[in-house]
Image: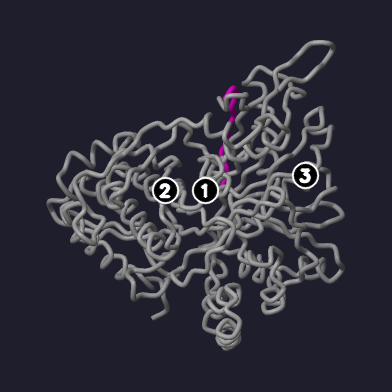
Amino acid sequence: LCTHKNGFRKEGFILSVDIGTTSIRCHVYDKVASIRGSCTTKVEILYPQVGYVEMNPDAIWNGFIRVVKGAVQDAGIQMHQIEALGISTQRGTFTTWDRKTGVPFHNLISWQDQRAAELVKAWNRSCTLKVIHGVMKLVYFLSRQKRCLAASLIVFSTQHVTMRLIWVLTHYKQVCQAVSEGNCFFGTIDTWLLFKLTKGRLHATDYSNASSTGIFDSYQMCWSQLLCSMVSLPLSIFPKVEDTGCEFGCTDPSIFGVPIPIMSLMADQQAAMFGECCFNPGDVKITMGTGTFMDINTGCKPHTSVAGLYPLVGWKIGSEVVYLAEGNAADTGTAINWAQKLELFTDVQDTSAMAYSVPDSDGVCFVPSFSGLQVLQFNRMSAPLNDPKACASFMGLKPTTTKCHLVRAILESVSFRNMQLYDTMHRETNIPITKIRVDGGVSANNFVMQLTADLFGRKLSRMQHHEMSCLGAAFVAGLGVGFWRSREELKKLHSTDDVFVPRGSPKAGARIPNGEYIPVFQSWERALRRSMNWYGKT
């Protein structure tokens, strides 16, 4: 794809930006999906109080501008050679702002924030929710409509926007006043950036981001009127929901010197799914970054879960809607970064060799619960668990315990959490799993990858590109302007870095080869239970 300027043919490029929890990255992609230029800046996380996790919205905006200009400069090209812009963002982080001035009323409240933990607990125990559960179960019994079953299983979580937004409307008088005056906009990071990029012309989001808030009805494909009326959220503040791959206007020319078509907005995990080319039902993607996110393509229908899997819109492009079922575990990369700060190791690359240097963890178990604990099911008989009061912990320490044992226990905990997610997903969706692709910074660790393959009893493919969210948003944007013609073309651009094959043969009825890790895994689950409700009131 080329552009014409002053009579010369210029090569075209796709620009993609990913706003993650710890960094903002921008890549310039060419026709063969190679990165021609990059720029990264760190995201400063603010902790104003215990349990509060925030980001400065103006710092995010300035960082966005910086990486776009830096990546284009690094590629040695001109801004007018950019054919389209794709944006991928962390999910569940939001702010509210004055719709006239564009000034935020407060900082971005992160998906990791725990300020609404008590509110979540109160609502999950409330008579209102119990009545709704009962009524919806009855309606489902009579109608057999899955969305009624979904409504009968609603529980709130601090990761969802719902309760944190209610907390804002309750505690910030300026926001309440703006809502009453019709002068308040709410939005996740993608909506905030779109508003800024278009100089206030657009207040919109896409289906993947909307479905990740916990306020969206994935069956009706709209903001949930039932939920909003139940918890008194004003629909007037919500952005318009558009297709994932449509033209969200152009950037204002004053920002980058030329208008750039904004051709995709995507939530990061859905973008990674698209970047991994997981286009078919049964395709599984695992992203191991700050947290672990495991997604399975469920096709054209949302999956109704009783085990805690979350139904998401993967993407909506034209008339096609693709749904995902997702399980997640917090604090994957967080635990490894914490261990590095403690100087258990110097370089993250050393951790795999350290883990392999000892035959086992010497009975040490690590529970990675810095942000509370979310467990789908411990076993077939247990209920989903969300415990924001759980603590991170080492258990089973002995005088013989070394740094290598501690590091191995930390890496094992990552694979064990993967096993919990996979086991629930495998049993509950009842969809034959066709392939498993893994990305994210932690996927570079060979010990974690091999142990995960052993526990699954399945082959894992680690991709050459570790930043799949950025690539996925670029793919959707490129398809929108004809930079790439089809998904088959995208599949041909895909390159696998390494394949991890499970060692040994699984015993009958078990996916863990030779049962080697069964007692270790069971000990770790006991440690997980003992870490629960640590910060509860006594």
User: Marks 2 and 1: in contact by CB < 8 Å?
Assistant: yes
Q: Residue 301: which quarter of the image?
A: bottom right
Q: Is residue 115 left or right of residue 308?
A: right
Instruction: Tell me the CA gap for discs 1 and 2.
Output: 9 Å
**Amino acid type at mark 1:** Asn
Colour mapping: one colour
Q: Earlier in the sequence, mark 3 or mark 1?
A: 3
Identity, as a three-letter code, of the amino acid under mark 2: Thr
Residue denoted by label 1? 280
User: Which stretch did the figure color magenta?
Assistant: 35-44
Nearer the N terminus, badge 2 or badge 3? 3
**Is the Cβ of the residue at disc 3 closer than 8 Å to that at disc 1?**
no
Closer to viewer: mark 2 or mark 3: 2
Q: CA distance from mark 2 to mark 3?
A: 34 Å
Helix, strand or loop under label 2:
loop
Q: Is residue 223 left or right of residue 307?
A: right
Q: Dot 1, how many residues are within 10 Å of its Cα: few (below 14), some (14-19), or many (20+)?
A: some
Under mark 3, the amino acid is Phe
Residue of label 2: 434
Asked if labels 3 and 2 touch by Cβ distance under 8 angstroms, the answer is: no
Taking depth in this image into account, of 79 and 481 the one nearest to the observer is 481
Q: Report the residue marked by disc 3.
A: 248
What is the quadrant of the N terminus in the image?
top right
Q: Nearer the viewer, residue 126 or 10?
A: 10
Q: Nearer the viewer, residue 322 or 191?
A: 322
